[in-house]
Amino acid sequence: MGAEGIPAKISSERRRLWRTFLRNRAAVVGLVLAILVTILSVAAPLFTSHDPLAQDARSRLQPPDQTHLLGRDTFGRDLFARVLFAGRISLLVGVCSVLLGGVIGSTLGLVAGYTGGKIENVIMRFVDTMMAFPSLLLGLLVLAVLGPGLFKMILAIGLMLSPAFARVMHGSALSLKKREFVEGARSVGAGPARIVALHILPNVMGEVVVLGSLWTASAIRIEANLSFIGLGVSPPTPTWGNMIRDGTPHLLNAPFLSVFPGLAILVAVLAFNLLGDGLRDVLDPHLREY
Amino acid sequence: MLKYVAQRLILSIPVFLGVATIVFLVVRVIPGDPAVASLGDYASKEAVDALRQRMGLNESLPVQYVRFLGSLVQGDLGKSMITGSSIRDEIMHALPYTLELTVLAIIIGTLLGIPVGVYTAIRRNRMADYIGRILSLTGLSVPAFYLGILLILLLAIQFRWLPAVGGGGMDDLKENVSHLILPALTLGLVMTASVARLSRSAMLNVLRQDYVRTARAKGLKERVVHLRHALRSALIPIVSVTGIWAVSLIGDSVTVEVVFARPGLGKMMVGAIMQRDYTALQSIMVVYTGFVVVINLMIDLIYGWVDPRIRH
């Protein structure tokens, strides 16, 4: 077999997918927005010289002006700097919780789908029950018991998202395990762990990436909800949710306190939703939802 | 149909028990001691022990579980760990505010979402479709509590049309309704976005089918083809996703109640979380579970009505 021939083939396949992606205008907008949000928050110190935690009691609730682009909050802290730095928490929670939920959920789903029988029954009944409940309420309950904190937030949201991954992966494993290449692997003596890891997993990665992107959007939205309620990362660390929470008592005299962080949430969530939709069209047209 | 209804009713019991069990387990199995959490890290060992005793946490898990189920069956939701008052009374007081909010929001979301979805599917790739898609994607991305804040700024503060916060009481109908409109609109619009999006793709899926082409070929009016032939079968997936979004709306109702300071279940629950009142938290969650089970039951029944195949 020509060893050089294979990479060339893969790269041309990649290029084809990439071209399909670029043709989808909404997806490109999503990708650009997602990159923009990431750069703005990860490299926040490059875009603002203000300290997000520095207080200045004399200029509290000062409206936006030239030096403080988005105004100042109840402690006189620069709102623009806070919005940028808050993005770090949201993105971190979004990405990490999806990784966690994706790994747990996909493993459960693939194992259930491939092994079948009693194990499948137990796992999938559990998944169904979890999915019958609004994820936001479940996250609230878990966080209320765990207490606030960044790591606990990631854990709670990751656990909430895992049933959704499990359900989709279960379906994929069910249909893949009947295919010839899996039967072929089994007939030459490959064990279940090897088949799931080497033969089934590579075939569901497309779906995992699509789900991951869409659920990152949800995770950011859920994080905002939880920290709005006061269960997120503790102050003074800014998050978009807790900034809006601090702003709501001042809706009459300083609405910008709540409006700007909310816009940031909207842009970030929209970016990952658009990106996920676009990826779905590229990687798996069959996955289009009803 | 009657047999189908009875069957669904019986099937919803294990779902309720399952979810109630998850609530029970989360409060107990997750590391961390509710007694320590509610008294604070510096509480004396005696105080913690006394509270554990009072909460029944010293019993073994199965014993606690049987007690939990026993009091559920009797409709006993326990006493608040903070005030000592009956949680059931407090819930009964808060429940109407949450019920009227979620019911009206689901009505708004369905009555607005399905027609918008069907219309944009018919006008695919025209102006109305693009606008509808952009709006529904925005609606999918905006957190409900933020939309609530924007509506307060616009309709309550800028135009002064409606009151921004409070529940309006349960006795004065006019006050009650005027306080209900904004929060219900908030939740309803969020639901509209998702329902419209999914109705659109369900409808598009059906419009591609052969029997729709046959209907057109017969010379039927477009209107008849869309409404009588296409929509009827598109309704089946639409009903099921509407149900999913109605359930997720329950989660959003919590933050919306907080934004609008409505004295409902969500606000009561957030209060219980802040005061670390685990007994109240667990009971409120069980009531929410009831909500979810009832919505799922209703969806199943509507499902059976829309699609006769399911009944048999």
Image (spheres, rainbow, N blue to C red):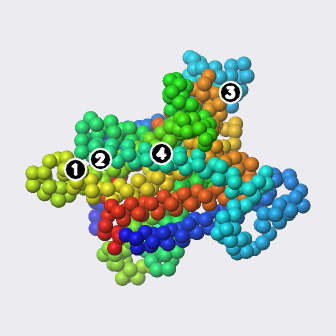
Q: Which residue is mark 1?
A: B226
Q: Is residue B29 above or below residue A249?
A: below
Q: What residue do we see at 40% from left, 73% from top?
A: B3
User: Residue B309: x, y in percent?
Assistant: 31, 69
Instruction: Estimate the spatial distance between the alpha carbons at disc 3 and disc 2, rounded to whole Å.
Output: 46 Å
**Kind of residue at disc 4:** Ala
Q: Which mark is residue B118?
A: 2
Q: Are labels 4 and 3 assigned to the same chain? A: no
Q: Is residue A12 above or below residue A105?
A: above
Q: Are marks 2 and 1 in contact (CB under 8 Å)?
A: yes
Mark closest to the chain's N terminus, 2 or 1: 2
**Kind of residue at disc 1:** His
Q: Which residue is mark 3?
A: A74
Q: Decide which of B111, A266 is in the foreground and name it.
A: B111
- Badge 4 element: helix
Q: Which residue is mark 4?
A: B105
User: Residue A118: x, y in percent?
Assistant: 50, 80
Instruction: Estimate the spatial distance between the alpha carbons at disc 2 and disc 1, rounded to whole Å.
Output: 9 Å
Q: Is residue A164 visible?
A: no
Instruction: Estimate the spatial distance between the alpha carbons at disc 3 and disc 1, rounded to whole Å.
Output: 55 Å
User: Residue B303: x, y in percent?
Assistant: 37, 62
Instruction: Estimate the spatial distance between the alpha carbons at disc 4 and disc 2, rounded to whole Å.
Output: 20 Å
Given the image, what chain letter belongs to the residue carrying mark 4? B
The part of the image, by quadrant, that contains residue B228 is bottom left
Q: Mark 3 or mark 2: which is in front? A: 2
The part of the image, by quadrant, that contains residue B262 is top right
Given the image, what chain letter belongs to the residue carrying mark 2? B
- Badge 1 element: helix
